[in-house]
Amino acid sequence: MTTYRQLTIWDVLDELSESPPTSSLDAMCDCLDAELESLPLEAQLSTAALAFSQIADILKSRAEVLLQDTRDGLRPAVGDRNNP
């Protein structure tokens, strides 16, 4: 019999950190909401703070990748006949 385990917010954040920069954050938001729901208030705040910190790091990395892609796209190609 196959057993399944529910992903925690930390599992989802780990997957999200390795996913393409344009992938959706919807699953992470749903998972965070579900995980916080069952915790006492102090634990909710602590967990949310840690999750938001990791989310900010992921978004920063994604932004850096997208900005670099944009910069690379604006540079002329080596040997471009219009710009030798």
Image (spheres, helix red, strand yellow):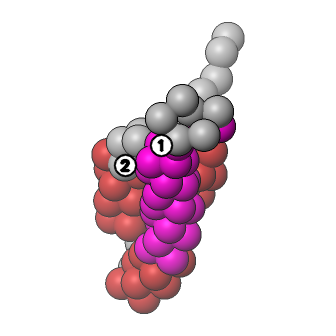
Residue to which mark 1 is pinned: 73
Indicate whether 42 appears above or below 16.
below
Q: Main secondary structure of the magenta part?
A: helix
- Name the amino acid, label 1: Gly
The residue positioned farthest toward the bottom in the image shown:
42
Mark 2 is surrounded, within 10 Å at the Cα level, by few (under 14), some (14 to 19) or many (20 or more) other residues, namely few
Residue to which mark 2 is pinned: 25
Q: Residue at x 51, y 77 (%)?
A: 53
Q: Which residues are magenta?
A: 51-78
Name the secondary structure under disc 2: loop
Q: Position of residue 36 (x, y in %)?
A: 38, 67
Q: Nearer the viewer, residue 59 or 14?
A: 59
Q: Position of residue 68 (x, y in %)?
A: 54, 55
Q: Residue at x 47, y 43 (%)?
A: 73
Indicate whether 74 appears above or below 49.
above
Sequence-first tag of 1 and 2: 2
